[in-house]
């Protein structure tokens, strides 16, 4: 008896939420659209939004964002161990679970010399006075 991935997923607890999350992740990888924000900006998004946050690794399952907010990474083990750096700066693209946690879909290492202060200033411009320049 074979079941499709969707059928198997539909029988698990939180099935609708998980299926919806995977659908949003698939849509992200199809069109590449997600909201770039910082830790404080996460409060402006609903759970389930695809977001991109940049920060410094603060342990195995957390990062400190460019504006100093600690974000928990839910199910971070799903990211290949070589993709998630042990230290330095990283971009996490994933699904917002709540205002302080993200389920990562992708991690990109930015190294130890990445300037988080400049990034945070850019986020302020991208989501503020120059938002129209960065919108699709």
Image: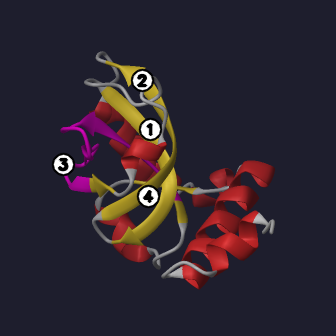
Q: Is residue 58 above or below residue 125?
A: above
- Discs 3, 2 touching: Cβ within 8 Å: no
Q: Residue at x 48, y 40 (%)?
A: 79
Q: Earlier in the sequence, mark 1 or mark 2?
A: 1
Residue 81 shown left or right of residue 1 in the figure:
left
Q: Is residue 17 above or below residue 24?
A: below
User: Which residue is label 1 attached to?
Assistant: 91
Mark carried by residue 68:
3
Question: Is residue 76 covered in magenta?
Answer: no
CA gap between label 1 and label 2 equals 7 Å
Q: Nearer the viewer, mark 1 or mark 3?
A: 1
Dot 3: element = loop
Instruction: Find the magenta span and give its range.
Output: 51-71
Say which quadrant the C terminus sits in: bottom right
Dot 2: element = strand
- Discs 2, 4 touching: Cβ within 8 Å: no
CA gap between label 3 and label 2 equals 17 Å
Residue 38: % across, % down: 36, 54
User: Which residue is label 4 attached to?
Assistant: 103
User: Which residue is label 2 attached to?
Assistant: 110
Q: Residues within 10 Å of mark 1 (few under 14, many from 20)?
A: many
CA gap between label 1 and label 3 equals 14 Å
Q: Earlier in the sequence, mark 4 or mark 3?
A: 3
- Discs 1, 2 touching: Cβ within 8 Å: yes
CA gap between label 4 and label 1 equals 13 Å
Q: Nearer the viewer, mark 2 or mark 4?
A: 4
């Amino acid at each position: 008896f074979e079941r499709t991935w969707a059928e198997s997923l539909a029988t698990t607890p939180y099935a609708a939420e998980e299926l919806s999350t995977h659908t949003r992740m698939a849509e992200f990888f199809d069109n590449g659209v997600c909201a770039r924000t910082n830790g404080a900006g996460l409060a402006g998004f609903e759970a389930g939004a695809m977001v991109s946050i940049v920060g410094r690794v603060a342990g195995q399952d957390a990062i400190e964002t460019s504006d100093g907010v600690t974000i928990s990474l839910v199910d971070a083990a799903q990211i290949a161990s070589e993709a998630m750096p042990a230290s330095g700066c990283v971009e996490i693209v994933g699904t917002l679970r709540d205002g302080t946690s993200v389920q990562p879909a992708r991690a990109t290492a930015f190294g130890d010399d990445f300037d988080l202060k400049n990034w945070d200033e850019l986020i302020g411009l991208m989501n503020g006075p120059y938002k129209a320049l960065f919108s699709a």
